[in-house]
Amino acid sequence: MLDVATIERLAARLDEAERTKSLIPMFTKEYPDFSIEDAYAVQRAWTRLQLGRGRVIKGHKIGLTSKAMQNAVGISEPDYGVLFADMFYADATPIPFDRFHAPRIEVELAFVLKAPLRGPDCTIFDVLNATDYVTPALEILETRMHRVDPETGKARKVMDTISDNAANAALVLGGRPIRPMDADLRWIGALLFRNGEVEETGLAAGVLNHPANGIAWLANRLAPHDEHLKAGEVVLAGSFTRPVDIRRGDTFHADYGAFGSVSCQFV
């Protein structure tokens, strides 16, 4: 792994890029042996910087949960990041476009926990028992580094995305609360509209065959770091649509049918 000083320096670069709305070079370009564990170490160092400024952790996100996305980036497991309280927006709330640099949006389910979840042997059944309710959600993605290197034309790697808090920037919760045993969560689907036109559709089964599987994976992935998911946390289970670019003035509406809808506008 990279040494502590290098990890902290890379975290500081990400922090500066977020505050200045600028893009930095990919870490994998500068450090060709940059590993997934290096990436999570940078993410944890970046998280400590945010906590030092008074930001409050309110949950976690899981990404790269579909087989198509995992195959595209050459990994066999999802990734995860941290949700801070100031990332949350209520349904139908105007969101300042200037908060972001190059945002994108995805359709997900959010799990709200009523009990803690700890690995290393967490299962889907533990997740369902620990979940208070599930609700529709929109995740807003952002990048603090180049997606494509302007010099080489090479795309960033999953290690870059992980270090960049798994590309998370904000989220919107809406729809109606669903008790986890009141519906087959695999079959919850959504239509994502941008300015009245359908951009994407998908089923929650695209998330590791069942969205609760992602929550169990995360609890187990956190365990070696002596971390766990706490009661009251919101956990984004992973997208079941591709990310859609956001433009200033766009209105997004995700229709989950009988499970309600969630929307936002970028002003």
Image: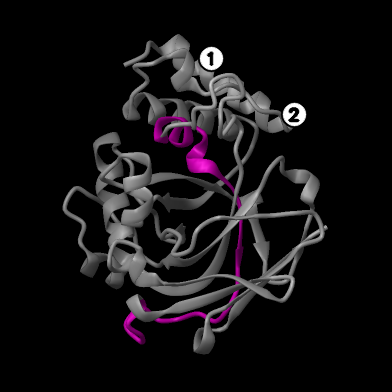
Picture coordinates of residue 48, whole percent (x, y): 52, 30
SS at circle 1? helix
In the rendered structure, find residue 109 and report the number of the disc placed on it. none
Q: Is residue 37 left or right of residue 267?
A: left
In the foreground, 209 or 20: 209
Picture coordinates of residue 258, whole percent (x, y): 51, 89
Residue at (38, 10) in percent of width and height: 3
Quarter of the image that includes the C terminus:
bottom right
Mark 2 vs mark 1, CA separation in Å: 17 Å
- The kind of residue tagged 2 is Thr
Picture coordinates of residue 125, whole percent (x, y): 22, 69
Q: Give the answer, above or below, for where 102 lies relative to 23.
A: below
Q: Is residue 114 left or right of residue 259?
A: left
Residue at (32, 58) in percent of width and height: 214
First-in-chain label (2 vs 1): 1
Q: Is residue 163 left or right of residue 217?
A: right
SS at circle 2? helix
Q: Is residue 150 left or right of residue 264?
A: left
Q: Is residue 170 magenta?
A: yes
Q: Is residue 142 magenta?
A: no
- Disc 2 target residue: 20
Which quarter of the figure has residue 13?
Answer: top right
**Mark 2 Cα-neighbour bin, 10 Å: few <14, some 14–19, many ≥20:** few
Q: Which residues are magenta?
A: 158-185
| Residue farthest to the left, as pictured | 121
Which quarter of the figure has residue 137?
Answer: bottom right
Which quarter of the figure has residue 68?
Answer: bottom left
Quarter of the image that includes the N terminus:
top left
In the rendered structure, find residue 9 and report the number of the disc placed on it. 1
In the foreground, 97 or 201: 201
Q: Give the answer, above or below, for where 187 lies relative to 101.
A: below
- The kind of residue tagged 1 is Arg
